[in-house]
Image (cartoon, grey):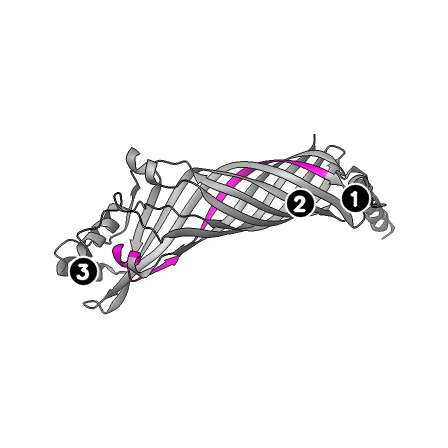
Amino acid sequence: MSNIKKLTAVLLFSFLSLSVFAFEDGFTLGLKANFSGSYTDPHINKEDKAYLGAQFMKGMLGFVMNGDLELTYIFDSKKYFKYENNNIFGGLGLGFNFGIGQGGSGQISGQHDDGLDKDIEVYCRVFMTPVLNFGTSLKTYLLKNRLVLGFTIGGKMPLDPHPTYELYSNLSTDELKALLSASGNHVDFRGDVGTLIVPAEMMKKINPLGCVLKGSIEYNQPMIDTMQVIFGAYIQYHIYKPGYVTMPKKVEEAAKFKNPEVNFSEHPIKSFYMNSIDFGVNLGLLFKV
């Protein structure tokens, strides 16, 4: 029992002694790996929804990863704000981050079919790599600079000219056959995977940049006097208005069956926002520069 007490005392002393390594001011460089759940939050008006051949449109949940490099300057509470110590408020930080990783969107769209007497739901996921992330952060350092609250305004830009997709529906094999027979082979919602080929002219029309608003909380655990380990969590909202949309060929053919004038590459979808809510955790290393 005495050995356990001694070990506990040593561990507590070691943990408390690490507080002397807390970064109090100056530049820091962070390297982070972000593990995100991403829920697509589409917004579109009734007219454009009808143009796309859908009566409803909902979002889907996916998973993406990315890495960040972040340079931050800490304005120490004692030097810049005249506090006696940093036990509670350690200061403010101004950070700039740059990252690259994966991106994706998922949508459920469809309409009611009288022949089948059910709502046909078409599930479409699009995967993009790489996606560029960047932003500016304001940080508040608390509890001897161990706890960090941050707010970021930034951007997200997909750089993949040939994203991949997977397409499937809620129809059984018999329902797919019945739908194909009734529609004269013009509507085909069998499962499909492929690549979206985005023509160069359309790439010029598509808005590549979205706005990101992000809130985060991090705990920094000192290891040595020049390095800390980062444990964090975050939630962000991505606002993205593409203007023009790219869809799998099957979706465009189904829309043309309802409206022969449909041409996604020629007509902008003015009301369409492909927003998303991203949330997750991050792990990383923080270095004193």
Residue position marked by numbered label 2 in the rendering: 139
Lower sequence index among marks 1 and 3: 1
Q: Position of residue 207 (x, y in %)?
A: 38, 41
Q: 170 and 31: which one is in front?
A: 31
Badge 2 crowding class, 10 Å Cα cut-off, few under 14, some 14 to 19, many 20 or more, is many
* Badge 1 element: loop
* Badge 2 element: strand
Q: 91 and 120: which one is in front?
A: 91
- Badge number at residue 81: 1
Give the residues drawn in magenta, as a range: 48-74
Picture mark count: 3
Q: Is residue 15 left or right of residue 44?
A: right
The answer to whether residue 285 is above or below residue 111 is: above
Q: Position of residue 82 (x, y in %)?
A: 82, 44
Q: Residue at x 68, y 41 (%)?
A: 93
- Amino acid on which disc 1 is placed: Phe
How far apart marks 2 and 3 lie (CA) works out to 56 Å
In which quadrant is the C terminus drawn?
top right
- Amino acid on which disc 2 is placed: Lys
Quadrant of the rendered image containing residue 46: bottom left
